[in-house]
Amino acid sequence: MSRSRSGRSRSRGRGAVRQGLFYVTATIVAFFMLLPFFWMVSTSLKQKGALMAIPIQWIPPEISFEGYRKLFSVIPFGRAVMNSIVVSSMVTLVTMTSATMAAYAFSKLEFRGRDRLFYAYLATMMVPGQVTIIPVFIVLKYLGLLDTYAGVVVPTSLFNAFGIFLLRQYMSTIPNDFTEAALIDGASHFAVFARIVLPLSKPIIATYGVLTFMGAWNDYFWPLVVLSDRNKMTLPVALSHLSGQYNSDYNTLMAGSLISILPIILVYLFAQKYFEAGLQVGGLKQ
């Protein structure tokens, strides 16, 4: 009896040590991951002359909000923020609408060549985006969509094979008994899609919605290619104007970067519950 008790106490001790090491390691990793964020906050509050001080001053001796004030005078920052909100919201809305409907068709509807069409659509993921930039640009030019929000939204929203794949794999796990019972009772496919499949797919939809919004919010290259009007440029494009070839206004750049991450944090906090559930499920099982 004494031996069994001592064995249990030793196993508990080893478990406590492993748990302690895990928390220490996680704390160290989190510290180094948050270090760039601390540096960004510190730099945004520094005076211009203190940016390159050696040794590094993590806490500014004199806090200055000049970078934040200058942010709205050098570039149309407020307009850029609104442009990014509009573009990111449109991309997320169009992407989620088209991807969920396509995923429902590929997972719940039976039609000839369904799997072959799905695999052919997945094959487009193998084509690098850089290869299609010039053809898509020419198409947008002939359609008159250059320098418009539609030119930014449509090419990035309607042809997202990864989103359809992710949602389709999750919807495939929903038992067909639910949808078949609703169809037998006289419900249309749209009713089944809206009232049964979408509510049961909230975790993966929220997860993919957050990822889509983040990708659209941080997208720099495609808005730079399509948009030429200064009043239509998105936030990443506007912030790039603060970094020149020979001179960079780092405190203003860091102030803009700090403000630009706030919407992402708010979106994540809003969908945190569903986001974490979607990551746990993964949506990748058949």
Image (tube, rainbow, N blue to C red):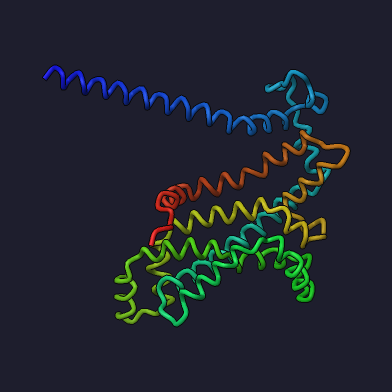
Q: Position of residue 104 (x, y in %)?
A: 45, 71
Quarter the C terminus occupies: bottom left
Q: Residue at x 56, y 46 (%)?
A: 266
Examine the rendered structure and indicate whether residue 173 appears above or below residue 45.
below
Q: Indicate the quadrant where residue 229 lies.
A: bottom right
Q: Position of residue 51 (x, y in %)?
A: 78, 27
Examine the rendered structure and indicate whether residue 52 appears above or below residue 210.
above
Q: Residue at x 78, y 21 (%)?
A: 53
Q: Residue at x 82, y 56 (%)?
A: 230
Q: Position of residue 56 (x, y in %)?
A: 72, 21
Horizontal placement of 15 versus 162: left or right?
left
Horizontal placement of 93 versus 52: left or right?
left
Which residue is the extreme one toward the left?
A: 1
Q: Residue at x 46, y 24 (%)?
A: 24
Horizontal placement of 220 versus 20: left or right?
right
| Residue 9 vs residue 263, the one in the foreground | 9
Q: Position of residue 170 (x, y in %)?
A: 42, 61
| Residue 79 vs residue 168, the one in the foreground | 168
Quarter the N terminus occupies: top left
Examine the rendered structure and indicate whether residue 63 appears above or below residue 167.
above
| Residue 72 vs residue 173, the one in the foreground | 173
Examine the rendered structure and indicate whether residue 21 appears above or below residue 247.
above
Q: How many marks?
A: 0
